[in-house]
């Protein structure tokens, strides 16, 4: 406890020094004019000024429309040359970065080591949990180190394939104590031998960070990472014990994601101060752990970063293409957020292929216009077709339909359609049966355009609807920045009954029947 109090005081002092230097500036940052630091805000530039081709970037923006991208950002030499947001998503909305959260946890582990709170990544993992009774304890489990957690080679028995259902992660989420669930798992291999993707590994590190610092990983990040980088808007989910989820659950704005990539591009330095040891960024950029993936045999891994050696790029990678890509040689950071998977190698080729020179190119008005028009096009929402409004719209407007327990989680639904301001009222069963149901309300667009809700705990929800025929209505819901595909429900009205069809989050088609309620 005394060590924790010391850690908290040290972090507070360190934060004061950082904030003071940000406010006042440092002689080092002023002297090193060739390096741009986007602490307060990013500087922008034309692609040609940074040796990149606007026309090639326009093709990349177009490519993003086929990959359900929400945003696409590229910075070269510390200046943003491409900053595109696909409607209805906008720049000011935090976006879940899914497993790219792991790279943030790894970065915090590096900071703890630099600050003397962690002696070595080779420290045995179980030493931090000596107060816990651990099941299936054997020599293999005792040999787990923090580095084997960081490299996904812990040997813990875990099923979370990169191309399949994450059964162990789902079981962890259903357990009342996630750390106990992870620690109690049996071992499937000797630590350090085999790569096996496991979101339990970074969650153990989140708990270890809390034990080292006396702070949640989120609060430690605020003091030592987000604060120095000028990141002020984020969300971070927590487990039942209040620990910041280590494997996923962090939401950041794309420009702030790029700051983390820029920290690595600058070898862990920020405004002349070491934030992360250069040896750490070097290990991440030259990872050697074979990921043994069938879809790309070249992929390597270390410190929660993915590496494509032939493309000369390393990245923080989250489910559905939440990427922070670092290209050391051309001095580029690229960020994508999305709602579907994307081909990593092809995306890297698009970005590298837009680099034409190490120095500025001649202005290219034609290419600049092409890029500007393409960004304007994807950022402007296009209305979809809507059917004629049938007579039944007025009859069902404002009525509430109730549903028994179901795989979609819908408890009740009411649509107010015969009103100048159409809206929905939705009630969802809680996963935890001891807790009350969750209620959502918001506008619904009937003109082919989304309407956005006020912020909810789940984010901003954009919704629109249309009549398919005289009894069938379709609802399209999109959680902006949620990293998930659009949710579509088909409603068939039959007197006092309502049939609702849609896919659950696993893609299974579900049909449920509800009845008119009070």
Image (cartoon, helix red, strand yellow):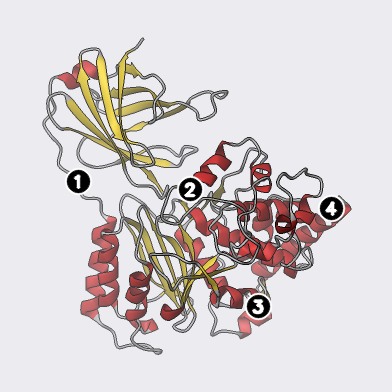
Question: Are circles 2 and 1 on residues that touch, CB within 8 Å?
Answer: no
Q: Position of residue 29 (x, y in %)?
A: 62, 79
What's the mark number on residue 383? 1
Q: Mark 2 = which residue?
A: 166
Q: Mark 3 = which residue?
A: 279
Neighbours of disc 3 within 10 Å: few (<14), some (14-19), many (20+)? few
Residue for point 42% across, 71% down: 297
- Picture quadrant of residue 416: top left
CA distance separating discs 2 and 1: 36 Å
Q: Mark 4 = which residue?
A: 5
Question: Are circles 1 and 4 on residues that touch, CB within 8 Å?
Answer: no
Q: Position of residue 183 (x, y in %)?
A: 68, 48
Between marks 3 and 1 in the image, the one whose residue lies nearer the viewer: 3
How many numbered marks have been drawn onto this rendered protein structure? 4
In screen coordinates, is 365 left or right of 263? Answer: left
In screen coordinates, is 259 left or right of 22? Answer: left
Give the SS element for disc 4.
Answer: helix
């Amino acid at each position: 406890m005394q060590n924790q109090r010391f850690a908290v005081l040290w972090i507070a002092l360190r934060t004061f020094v950082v904030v003071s230097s940000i406010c006042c500036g440092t002689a080092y940052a002023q002297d090193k004019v060739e390096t741009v630091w986007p602490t307060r805000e990013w500087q922008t530039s034309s692609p040609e000024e940074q040796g990149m081709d606007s026309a090639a970037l326009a093709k990349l923006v177009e490519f993003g429309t086929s990959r359900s991208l929400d945003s696409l950002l590229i910075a070269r030499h510390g200046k943003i040359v491409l900053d595109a947001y696909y409607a209805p998503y906008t720049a000011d909305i935090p976006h879940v970065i899914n497993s790219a959260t792991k790279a943030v946890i790894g970065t915090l582990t590096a900071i703890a080591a630099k600050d003397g709170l962690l002696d070595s990544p080779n420290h045995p993992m179980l030493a931090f949990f000596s107060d816990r009774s651990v099941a299936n304890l054997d020599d293999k489990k005792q040999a787990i180190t923090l580095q084997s957690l960081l490299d996904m080679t812990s040997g813990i028995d875990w099923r979370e394939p990169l191309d399949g259902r994450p059964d162990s992660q789902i079981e962890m989420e259903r357990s009342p104590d996630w750390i106990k669930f992870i620690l109690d798992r049996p071992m499937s291999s000797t630590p350090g031998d085999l790569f096996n993707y496991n979101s339990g590994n970074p969650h153990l590190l989140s708990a270890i960070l809390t034990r080292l610092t006396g702070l949640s990983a989120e609060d430690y990040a605020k003091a030592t990472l987000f604060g120095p980088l000028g990141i002020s808007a984020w969300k971070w989910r927590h487990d039942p014990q209040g620990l910041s989820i280590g494997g996923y659950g962090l939401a950041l704005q794309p420009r702030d994601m790029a700051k983390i990539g820029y920290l690595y591009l600058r070898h862990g330095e920020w405004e002349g101060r070491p934030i992360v040891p250069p040896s750490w960024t070097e290990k991440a950029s030259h990872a050697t752990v074979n990921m043994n993936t069938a879809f790309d045999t070249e992929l390597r891994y270390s410190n929660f970063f993915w590496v494509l050696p032939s493309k000369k790029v390393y990245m923080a990678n989250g489910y559905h293409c939440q990427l922070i890509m670092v290209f050391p040689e051309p001095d580029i950071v690229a960020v994508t957020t999305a709602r579907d998977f994307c081909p990593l190698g092809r995306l890297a080729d698009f970005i590298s292929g837009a680099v034409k020179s190490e120095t500025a190119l001649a202005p290219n008005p034609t290419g600049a216009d092409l890029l500007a028009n393409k960004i304007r096009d994807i950022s402007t929402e296009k209305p979809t077709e809507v059917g004629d409004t049938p007579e039944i719209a007025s009859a069902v407007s404002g009525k509430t339909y109730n549903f028994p327990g179901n795989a979609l989680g819908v408890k009740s639904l009411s649509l107010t359609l015969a009103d100048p301001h159409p809206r929905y009222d939705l009630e969802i069963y809680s996963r935890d049966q001891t807790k009350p149901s969750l209620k959502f309300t918001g506008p619904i667009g009937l003109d082919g355009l989304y309407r956005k809700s006020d912020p909810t705990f789940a984010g901003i929800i954009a919704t629109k609807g249309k009549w398919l025929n005289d009894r069938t209505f379709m609802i399209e819901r999109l959680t902006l920045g949620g990293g998930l595909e659009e949710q579509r429900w088909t409603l068939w009205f039959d007197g006092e009954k309502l049939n609702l069809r849609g896919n659950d989050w696993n893609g299974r088609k579900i049909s449920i029947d509800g009845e008119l309620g009070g």
